[in-house]
Amino acid sequence: MPKIALNDVTKSFGAKQVLRGITMEVPAGKSVVVIGGSGTGKSVMLKCILGLLKPDSGSIKIDGVEITTLHPWQRESMMRKFGMLFQGGALFDSLPVWENVAFGLVQGKRASKRKAQPVAYDALAKVGLSPDVGLLNPSELSGGMLKRVALARAIASQPEIIFFDEPTTGLDPITADVINDLIVESVRNLGATALSITHDMASARKIADIIAMFHDGKIVWQGPASEIDNSGNELVDQFINGRAQGPIKVDVKRA
Amino acid sequence: MLIFASVGRLALAVFAIVGSLSKFLVQSVLSCLVPPFFLRQLGRQLWRIGYNSLPVVGLTALFTGSALALQIYIGGSRFNAEGIVANIVAIGITRELGPVLAGLMVAGRVSAAIAAEIGTMRVTEQIDALVTLSTSPFKYLVAPRILAATICLPILVGIADTIGILGGYLVGTRSLGFNSAVYLKNTVDFVELGDVTSGLIKAAVFGFIIALMGCYHGYHSAGGAQGVGKATTNAVVSASVLILASNYFLTSIFFGE
């Protein structure tokens, strides 16, 4: 049984149809990376799986359980299986770093702060951050540190499934590679299932077991990461080689 | 045909807002009543909404009470009724000016702050992050603010009533030549319990409105910094208008024939 299974999922915003029948499976313990251009619906798909958006039609199952029809209290307990690294980190400004990392344990799992604090510092250590970072405010962190803290928060409660939303966007290549290594290591150590979305091909090659290509609200190719260079799909070839010419058209208004 | 289309669009937009606000209201009230309760968050909001609003509410009440005493004295002198200053200041402050002006001042300060804070959390995905961390944004963000504002406003208005009457007393005894003991006796004799309690009940309603509008507009903000700015403006304007409108209806209920 796949850990995550999407079947013919559609989602529209007004007249604009963003997801046009997504069917995809994420096997347990595997890392699936979804690539594709901006505005193709990758983040919308992720938000539908997380329950932040409700799909118009189709089925989304986690461990065989249909989640689109769950009651809010059932969804809250389902959320305990998830960890999420947001593109901008989404750390809580009002809390110091260690409380951000411990948040899922203290508020979500009702652990005491005394018990959650060492777990938070352990998670910070796993992403290469020293204990003194724990007392800083999120506004005092650099971009790379912020992503590490966000990763620490995502793994602190030892989730079964981790989502990564453009984990390396806005980082220099070296820091991005460090983050990629940490993602691979964290997912492997937890034995978790990972679903990532990214534009960054270096990141996709490093963290993916399976790559899926999104275009125009659909998955146009899916296969092992090792086969991405020989996909035989023009859309994939254009995207991974970053060519302006090809079947994917980007509208540019000229004066 | 064009005019029908415009009216139809407007009607649909109004229904959409009313529906969205009603759903938000029900979710907010349920979050205030159903555990888990985030008591630390409630304590923090009691401090921010209640204690931090004391200076602005106190100063507003002081100057309003003082100005009211002067106006009543000048107006009353036209028909030889200067002696009613203490009575009218007390009734005016406790029934109307205390709750309404405190409500409007707190709306400007608190509703804007709530909308800006929650709006920023919305556009930076912090609210989505709460959901992924198994925490209901309604219980963690909305309920503590609504409870805190509903608890704090009556206390603030109680203090505003006292300071407003004190402002009238100071002007009356220092500038207008009233005898201190007589002024106080007139105030105590004339004010009834219903005058004060009606103002405190109004204040609780205003507190609820202030927090609800701040949370609603912040929660639904979109579009970055501009969206947060718009949410903040909408929160203050809608809270202020709703305070004035509900004040009329509450006054009709409490004192209408």
Image: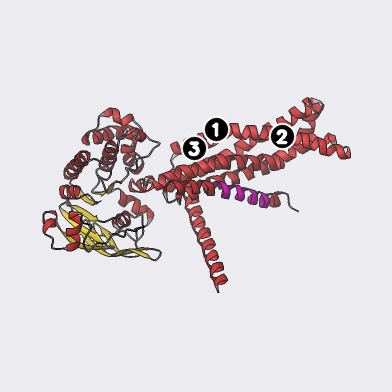
Residue lying at the far front in this picture: please name it: A255
State the SS at label 3: helix
Residue segment shown in magenta: B235-250
- Tell me the kind of residue under disc 3: Gln
Question: Disc 1: which chain?
Answer: B
Q: Which residue is mark 2?
A: B65
Q: Are marks 1 and 3 in contact (CB under 8 Å)?
A: no
Q: Are marks 2 and 1 in contact (CB under 8 Å)?
A: no
Magenta stretch: includes residue A13: no
**Can you give x and y, in whole percent of width and height, for residue A202 in the image?**
18, 47
- Say which label, 2 or 1, has the lower sequence index: 1
Q: Which residue is mark 3?
A: B45
Q: Looking at the image, is mark 2 or mark 3 nearer the viewer?
A: 2
Q: Nearer the viewer, residue A199 or B67?
A: A199
Helix, strand or loop: magenta stretch: helix
As drawn, the label of residue B51 is 1
**Can you give x and y, in whole percent of width and height, for residue A104 in the image?**
32, 42
Q: Are marks 2 and 3 in contact (CB under 8 Å)?
A: no
Q: Nearer the viewer, residue A121 or A19?
A: A19
Q: Quadrant of the N terminus of chain B?
A: bottom right
Give the CA separation, mark 2 to mark 1. Answer: 21 Å
Discs 2, 3: same chain: yes
State the SS at label 2: helix
The image quarter in which residue A253 lies = bottom left
In the rendered view, does A69 fall on the left or right side of A4? right
Q: Residues within 10 Å of mark 2 (few under 14, many from 20)?
A: many
